[in-house]
Image (cartoon, rainbow, N blue to C red):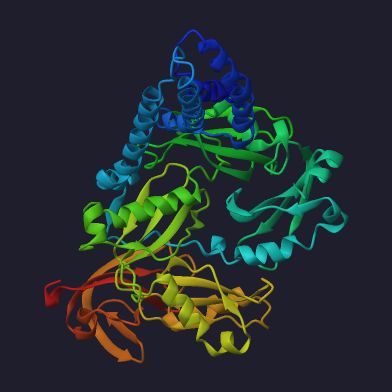
Amino acid sequence: MVVILAAAFLTLGLLHFDFSRDWWRGQSVRLVVGVPLCLVYTYFVMPPLVFPQAITLLLLTLVPNVGLTIAEAARKIVVSRRIVSIRRTPVLPPLIAVGVVLLYSGVLVALPVVDASGLRDVTGVTTTSAAPPAADLRHVRVVPEESAEFSGSKVLGQLGAYYLVGDYSVQSENGSLVWVAPLDFQGAIQWLVRGTSPGVIVVSAENPDAPAELRQRTPLRYIPSALLNTNLMRHVYMTYGTELLLETTLQLDGAGNPQYVVTLGRPTIGWSGEVVTAVVIVDPATGAMQRIPRSQFASLPKWISRVYPADLALEYNDWLGRYVHGWWNSIVTKRDVHLPVRDEVFGLLLDADRFVWFADHTSPNATDDSMTGFTYMDSRTGAMVYYTSAGGEFNSVAAERSVSANPIITQGRLIPTQPILYNIGQNTWVVPSVASNGKFQTLALVQAAGGHVVVGNSSAPSPVADAFAQYQAFLGGSTENTAAESTFDGTIDRFIATGSRILFTIRGRRQIFTIADPSDAAVLLARSGDSVHFTSTAPQDGTALVREFHDRTLGQ
């Protein structure tokens, strides 16, 4: 049991350094007092017993031990003035021991600074200038956590006397995005009286009109709000406490039953540079545990959508951009440095079975409202891709501000939240807007390239569908089935710039192509007769939206 191992390790700091004939007397006092305290500390605090970093834990017992040794030495100094034969307690050995451990602790603190580039290497990022994967509009995340909390709080009923809704986590259930939260005990009395939690609350993250579901199946005993040995973290720590317990998430298995997934890891550079080493699947009803090491992640159950924690994904994004050229550059010159725009990452589905963490990046300039790029990090494998093709487009803060300034949002006193970038023909910010109580009101779409804002009609049967319909009309193409794209080579036949769009045809085809809000000089300089190469979405109503336009006549 790790609790006993950790307590035994801490007792090494209780060594009595006075090796005279009264050594055992002093040692027994230290053990009688210190061992119970070590057991209590390790049981309730659950310090990770990860070596060699765990050596610093010895300071917890070494420092009081040295204090006691110095007090004994001071007492003997006073007594020895009257009784010359009394041997003084040596103080130097325990001070040296504390100094060595303190020095080692300092080395662990300094390592991430000395090897800052190593932190960036931990991310294993791949950089690309290609366009990001096209979005599937059936699985766009439009319900923010605030709205999930609002909906979930309405289904507790009489259970509210004993339970409260825990923290929500976004995840995939059978190919759809959902919010899931456990019913936690309100306190120790409720835990003593009830002993188990009746179930979980499930809220759709894709459909704001779908009602919250109180899913009551098998009672859950091992949950984070339980106490003593049924506390989930302690239950896992007692077996796997020799690794870092990075995150605990409640996820739904293939049958829709709740299971806890605990991510294990270890630091690689001092106490930093954490990497995932395994996951533990815990049945909250029985406490049965299954550990799956990193080398076997290919065999993870398909229902597990989250392995890499959101906090770790944010750290990876920070290391990726901050330490491009090491620690000193990140502080002084800041050459090529780019940082996450927000102190959070957002989970989304790229397709029916691939859950990723999203974060947009900007320059260190606090007033910069543009992106340098953004990342998608696969939550199961940790593979991270940094897309630079979005450089110069609106970042998430600018998108939120644009929505906040919209008259519809201002007049309704709505709060834009959870801006997530999707490739809907072109990069587009999806920004839900909620009331002050968290209730979903409407959806705003912001064109990342130009900042054009579309707000769904909140009085429409579906504000989400209305927002996408308006955006489709603005783009002059389809926002549906964006994955269906074609590549064309030809000569421009007719060409016209109108408002914020460019319309053209190519010889031999009757189809009309649209470039929405063009910003590329080559596009603006294009003329009839130019030889072009471009990619477009599937046509709708005879019009197709153009992406990646290249004018060969201009030498592109």
Q: Nearer the viewer, residue 376 or 36?
A: 36
Figure disc tally: 0
Q: Nearer the viewer, residue 449 or 310?
A: 310
Residue 490 is at least partly visible in this image: yes
Q: Quadrant of residue 372?
A: bottom left
Q: Position of residue 365 (x, y in %)?
A: 31, 72
Q: Residue at x 61, y 80 (%)?
A: 414
Quadrant of the drawing holding the C terminus: bottom left
Q: Quadrant of residue 127?
A: bottom left
Asked if residue 234 lies left or right of residue 241, the reply is right
Quadrant of the drawing holding the N terminus: top right
Q: Position of residue 69 (x, y in %)?
A: 48, 26
Q: Position of residue 160 (x, y in %)?
A: 83, 55
Q: Residue furthest top?
A: 21
Asked if residue 467 lies left or right of residue 185, the reply is left
Above or below: residue 349 compared with residue 114 = below
Q: Position of residue 312 (x, y in %)?
A: 45, 48
Above or below: residue 334 compared with residue 107 = below
Q: Residue at x 81, y 38 (%)?
A: 195
Q: Nearer the viewer, residue 362 or 469?
A: 362
